[in-house]
Image (cartoon, grey):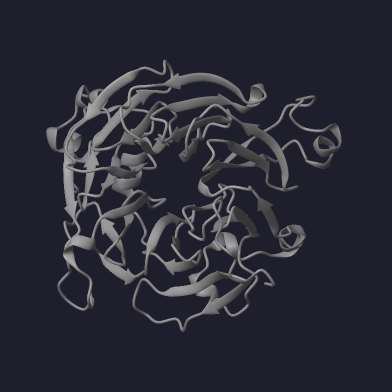
């Protein structure tokens, strides 16, 4: 790749293994409207793109998988092993550079099918895409309060949404194809946009009294989580009203994520803790503390006071989540254990995200670098798969009302893992 230096490590049996690292091709001069940090990285829902905010207002859209033959095929998800016409389609995707002109604090992918005649898209572009294919968008939150929305396959700027009065710190698309976009800002508000109505602002949420650091829409699109200071709020995505406030953190909450079945919510805070919640009842299920690990992990000179959390994300199968902290380590946690399953050194890490089909975890840091790691690949039990299937359409209260044994209820609402 001419845009970056790609560094591969020797693959070992221990996990997580560093598979590859992307670095900016050259150092850019700092000025008032840009910085070098990678505050956000993301894989597209269809697994065909990786978005890298490399700093200085620049986003790289990179076709996935990386074009590196040396990357061991044993560490690639099946979706990365292409044959025939699929190979040709992947080869037709070209890397793109998006110049946002401001510091990029957040980014997220959204997808939807586009009806014929939809005026958002030029007619010529509609004719190029088969009706079975999705339209893929990338929304970017900027330091000047604007949100720029791009069409991924062409790199064309579709919208420049304005309204926020300060940094747009986080973004979240609804996963139902509606192209509903939620934006969270340091102006203490959240805004709801409808991109199918030409970026119309449909709601402003004003319940926070501090900077809004993060937001996340549940996969079933019923709830929105947002956090400002130590306050975590849950909103209805149907009525845009406040459902409840979650209390438990002692310092600013900076990252949040729902489990794939929407039954769990995890939040990460500067108070060095992760909390796992039941979003339907507001109950705090478990708390995970970032302290030095025993065993083989060498923490070197990492100091306890430098373990403030930066990012947290759920794995696609819903049995693990990953976190990044200021103690310079990436941790992967199990729902069942109080201590991390594994850890890896990530200097100055800021963000992390899982590949949608598992097996790979991407991290970004303050130097504008991205690293790709192996992540636990396990075969979920039939019991867990059944639980996830049920919880995708049953709330906690609906499970409790079922005429089934108490132990089964406890399992379905994640009170026990057995």
The x and y percentages for residue 318 are 35, 48
Asked if residue 211 lies left or right of residue 58, the reply is left
Question: Looking at the image, which residue is at 20% across and 26% down?
Answer: 400
Asked if residue 392 lies left or right of residue 268, the reply is right
Question: Looking at the image, which residue is at 34% across and 54% down?
Answer: 380
The x and y percentages for residue 202 are 53, 18
Residue 203 appears in the figure: yes
- Position of 216 relative to 397 (above/below): below
Residue 418 appears in the figure: no
Asked if residue 411 lies left or right of residue 189, the reply is left
Question: Farthest bottom residue?
Answer: 10
Task: Determine the image quadrant of residue 125.
Answer: top right
The x and y percentages for residue 398 are 26, 23
Question: Looking at the image, which residue is at 51% across and 64% down?
Answer: 368
- Position of 368 relative to 301 (above/below): above
Q: Quadrant of the N terminus?
A: bottom right
The x and y percentages for residue 198 are 67, 24
Asked if residue 213 lies left or right of residue 9, the reply is left
- Position of 384 relative to 223 (above/below): below
Task: Determine the image quadrant of residue 396.
Answer: top left
């Amino acid at each position: 790749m001419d845009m970056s230096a790609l560094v591969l490590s020797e693959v070992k049996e221990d996990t997580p293994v560093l598979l590859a690292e992307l670095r900016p091709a050259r150092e850019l001069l700092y000025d008032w409207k840009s910085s070098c940090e990678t505050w956000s990285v993301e894989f597209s829902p269809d697994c065909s793109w990786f978005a890298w905010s490399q700093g200085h207002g620049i986003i790289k859209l990179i076709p996935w998988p990386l074009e590196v033959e040396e990357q061991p095929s044993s560490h690639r998800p099946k979706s990365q092993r292409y044959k025939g016409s699929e190979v040709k389609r992947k080869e037709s995707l070209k890397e793109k550079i998006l110049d946002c002109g401001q510091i990029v604090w957040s980014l997220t992918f959204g997808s939807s099918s586009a009806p014929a005649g939809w005026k958002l898209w030029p007619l010529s572009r509609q004719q190029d895409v088969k009706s079975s294919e999705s339209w893929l968008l990338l929304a970017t939150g900027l330091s000047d309060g604007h949100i720029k929305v791009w069409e991924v396959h062409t790199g064309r700027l579709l919208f420049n949404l304005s309204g926020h009065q300060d940094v747009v710190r986080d973004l979240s698309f609804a996963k139902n194809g509606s192209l509903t976009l939620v934006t969270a800002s340091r102006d203490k508000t959240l805004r709801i946009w409808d991109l199918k109505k030409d970026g119309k602002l449909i709601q402003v949420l004003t319940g926070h009294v501090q900077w809004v650091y993060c937001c996340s829409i549940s996969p079933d699109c019923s709830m929105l989580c947002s956090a400002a200071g130590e306050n975590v709020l849950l909103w209805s995505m149907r009525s845009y009203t406040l459902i409840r406030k979650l209390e438990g953190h002692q310092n600013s909450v900076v990252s949040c994520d729902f489990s794939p079945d929407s039954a769990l919510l995890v939040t990460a805070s500067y108070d060095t803790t992760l909390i796992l919640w039941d979003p339907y009842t507001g109950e705090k299920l478990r708390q995970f503390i970032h302290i030095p690990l025993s065993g083989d992990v060498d923490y070197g000179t990492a100091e306890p006071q430098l373990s403030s959390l930066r990012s947290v994300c759920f794995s696609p199968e819903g049995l693990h989540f990953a976190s990044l902290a200021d103690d310079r380590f990436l941790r992967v946690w199990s729902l069942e254990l109080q201590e991390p399953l594994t850890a890896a050194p990530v200097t100055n890490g800021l963000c992390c995200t899982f590949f949608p089909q598992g097996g790979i975890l991407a991290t970004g840091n303050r130097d504008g670098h991205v690293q790709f790691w192996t992540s636990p690949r396990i075969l979920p039990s039939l019991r867990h798969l059944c639980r996830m299937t049920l919880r995708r359409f049953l709330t906690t209260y609906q499970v409790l009302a079922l005429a089934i044994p108490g132990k089964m209820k406890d399992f379905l609402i994640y009170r026990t893992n057995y």
